[in-house]
């Protein structure tokens, strides 16, 4: 029987038009596509998400939240991208994740990529995201990709970081992001996941 094609969604946690995070996630998705996955960039600027207010009922949330939940629920694996903001991940991403729950993440493989203006590449941000993903019962892959001084690699004068289309980035960056985030092994795990029975919450 042919192996099912895993669906991998990439979720960059920046709303900025020329976002380096989006560019990095796009590269990671290109790596996943190369390894055989069907990929989708989920751009949070397409969703008019409210701030998470810990509503008692799902019906209290607007359509945009349900739409994002549906998109991520469909995915077999998820790549989270974040800019480093004050030594951590972005509030935009945290808010989006707070609006999600187990059906979107439980037992799924998650890859991490971060970018920063400074020299650290957002390592602390990814450490924080690992804790969030643990709470959501996701499997975060051990490797991760950090891109320091991101504006030098993805800056508008050198490269295109438009919301759509292929990203031009130096080979070293492209290879680091792809290697860490979207190895064939990772994609294969997502494929086994999509063949496996879903949790009751995901099967609904
Ligand atoms: C609110 C804010 C906080 C930031 N904090 C840090 C930081 O702690 N360390 C760092 O290296 N860069 C920091 N930066 C720079 C961003 O990480 C950098 O500009 C990154 O490219 C932004 O991601 P984006 O291009 O996807 O929007 C910060 C930027 C903003 C807007």
Image: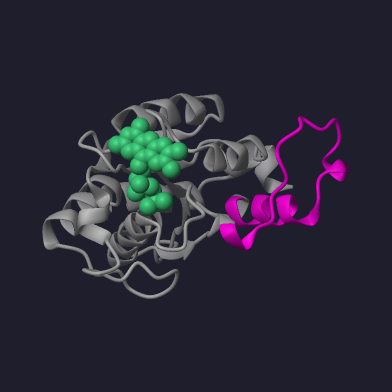
Picture coordinates of residue 195, whole percent (x, y):
49, 52
Looking at the rendering, in which quadrant would you find the N terminus? bottom left
Residue at x-position 69% and y-position 50%: 49
Would you say 86 lies left or right of 118 here? right
Q: List the single residue furthest toward the front.
A: 157
Would you say 194 lies left or right of 169 here? right
Front residue (pair 48, 180): 48
Which of the four quarters of the rendered structure image does ligand 1 lie in?
top left
Residue at x-position 68% and y-position 47%: 203
Q: List the single residue furthest toward the left.
A: 172
In the rendered image, which quarter is residue 64 located in? bottom right
**Magenta-drawn segment:** 45-72
Front residue (pair 103, 165): 165
Picture coordinates of residue 118, whole percent (x, y):
25, 38
Would you say 81 lies left or right of 94 here? left
Would you say 134 lies left or right of 177 here? right
Residue at x-position 74% and y-position 52%: 66
Q: Is residue 60 magenta?
A: yes
Identify the coloring.
one colour
The answer to whether residue 10 is visible is yes
Picture coordinates of residue 96, whole percent (x, y):
61, 43
Front residue (pair 75, 46): 46
The answer to whether residue 183 is visible is no
């Amino acid at each position: 029987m042919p192996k099912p094609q895993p669906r991998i969604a990439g979720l960059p946690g920046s709303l900025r038009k020329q976002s380096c995070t989006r560019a990095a996630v796009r590269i990671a998705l290109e790596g996943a596509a190369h390894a055989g996955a069907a990929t989708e960039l989920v751009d949070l600027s397409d969703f008019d998400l409210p701030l998470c207010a810990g509503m008692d009922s799902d019906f209290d949330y607007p359509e945009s939240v349900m739409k994002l939940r549906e998109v991520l629920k469909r995915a077999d694996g998820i790549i989270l991208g974040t800019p480093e903001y004050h030594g951590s991940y972005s509030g935009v991403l945290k808010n989006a994740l707070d609006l999600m729950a187990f059906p979107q993440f439980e037992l799924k493989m998650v890859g991490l990529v971060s970018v920063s203006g400074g020299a650290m590449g957002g390592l602390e941000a990814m450490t924080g995201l690992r804790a969030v993903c643990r709470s959501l019962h996701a499997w975060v892959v051990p490797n991760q990709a950090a891109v320091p001084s991101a504006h030098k690699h993805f800056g508008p004068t050198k490269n295109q970081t438009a919301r759509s289309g292929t990203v031009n980035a130096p080979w070293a960056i492209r290879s680091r992001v792809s290697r860490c985030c979207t190895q064939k092994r990772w994609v294969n795990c997502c494929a086994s996941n999509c063949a496996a029975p879903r949790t009751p919450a995901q099967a609904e």
